[in-house]
Image (spheres, helix red, strand yellow):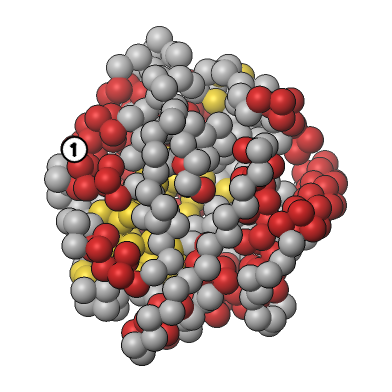
Amino acid sequence: MLFEPITLPCGQTLKNRAVKAAMEENMADASHYPSVGLKKLYSAWAHGGVGLIISGNVMIDKMAMTGPGGVVLEKHTPLDAFTDWATQAKQNQCKAIMQINHPGRQVMKNMGGKNLSASDIAVDIGKHSNLLAQPRAMTNDEILDVIQRFVDTALKAKDAGFDGVQIHAAHGYLLSQFLSPLTNKRNDEWGGDLHNRARILYEVIQRVREAVGTTFIVAVKINSADFQRGGFDVEDAISVVTTLNTLSLDFVELSGGSYEAPAMQGKSGDERTLAREAYFLEFATQIAEHAKMPIMVTGGIKRRHIAEKVLSKNVDLIGMASALAFSPDLVKKWQKGNEIDGFVPNVQWKDKAMTGLANMALVKRQLQRMGKGKTPRTNHSPLLSLILDRVRIARLTKAYRRWIAVD
């Protein structure tokens, strides 16, 4: 089943069900366009056998970044580098869509820029909380501006040659902050009951679809649950997906967690036990029963038999991220009959925040190696990788602050 094609509601056909899911890369050039290394990385994935590539975060506002070194695509951004990026990602009959995002409150304090959210609730990651900016509640005009920015970026992605976009409403980023009752304390039309909290997401989807037309892929990534007590949960996800059925989506990717509860790395924040692989399959199976569009599940998948198991549970697409950072051609090997298992780093330190950063650092180190034409390695030191990543992030942060000051 993994290597069967699938035709999405918009009419575009994927050659198989394997998807390179989004990862944080921090590999933009000095102008925050796709770098030469980033294009080389996506070429490797395109030749690696997946049917669809979803890009890492592309930011809709240069003043609101998930991290330094991120790609930014705004209304007036020149498209040459993006067109080349799309071309590299679409080799080997691979489709490529751009994940578009706004971080909201999940912004590091030393980045500067905008620190906005549904409400003025700060991120709580214990002793490391002071590293993140204190957000303020968005005004109605700022909400409308964000909606328009999603539309503008989607149109630019289409003009650059991408096959579609994925609207990121998971992992505690801005749209997810509106969905969660823990971070949305508003009493206007954008807050209160779930329908109002989801209003911004519905508006973004409708406006994007109207702008890009019916044959462009429009997908959404939402949490199956936040994995925090009192947060957005499976029942909420079912309700949202039921409404999304009416909005001409091509697929919904189900993930989970946030900076506070990094379930996307297999770490629950509310003591629920996540599977060792395909973390969110149990929750996705419940949600898929209510979905009329294709469903994609991401979360630690690294073995073919697990991928096939996921697809047998009323799921249409399987997303792979970290495993493709260490083996970009893993899917091609599977298709040739090699049942090799992929590798996903699993650092286990007492400090959960540092554990998450170390796992991400190990992954990003491999992405950078591939961007230089080198082969990924599985034996890097987590501690050294984290130190190198923090040094690199500090350098990129200084460069970003100079960029926004001059631009």
Indicate the position of residue 215 as horizontal and vertical percent values. 27, 64
Q: Specify the amino acid type for callout 1.
A: Thr
Residue 338 seen from this side? yes
Q: Residue at x 53, y 75 (%)?
A: 327
Q: Is residue 288 above or below residue 239?
A: below
Mark 1 surroundings within 10 Å by alpha-carbon count, few (fewer than 14), some (14 through 19), many (20 or more): some
* Quadrant containing the N terminus in the rendered view: bottom left
**Outermost residue to the bottom:** 336
Question: In the displayed structure, would residue 133 be above or below residue 223?
Answer: above
Which residue lies under the disc numbered 1? 242
Measuring from the top left, give residue 174's x and y in whole percent.
50, 34
**Residue 371 in the image: above or below residue 383:** below
Which residue sits at x=21%, y=69%? 7
Q: Nearer the viewer, residue 224 or 201?
A: 224
Residue 326 drawn at (x, y percent) = 57, 71
Horizontal relation, residue 346 to residue 8: left or right: right
Residue placed at 51% from the left, 34% from the top?
261
Nearer-the-camera pick, 215 or 388:
388
Establish if 115 lies above or below 86.
Answer: above
Secondary structure of the residue carrying tag 1 is helix
Q: Residue at x 44, y 13 (%)?
A: 186
The total number of labels drawn is 1
Image quadrant of residue 4? Answer: bottom left
Q: Position of residue 147 (x, y in %)?
A: 45, 37
Q: Is residue 31 visible?
A: no
Splitting the image into 4 quarters, where does residue 54 fall?
bottom left
Between residues 75 and 6, which one lies in front from this camera angle? 6
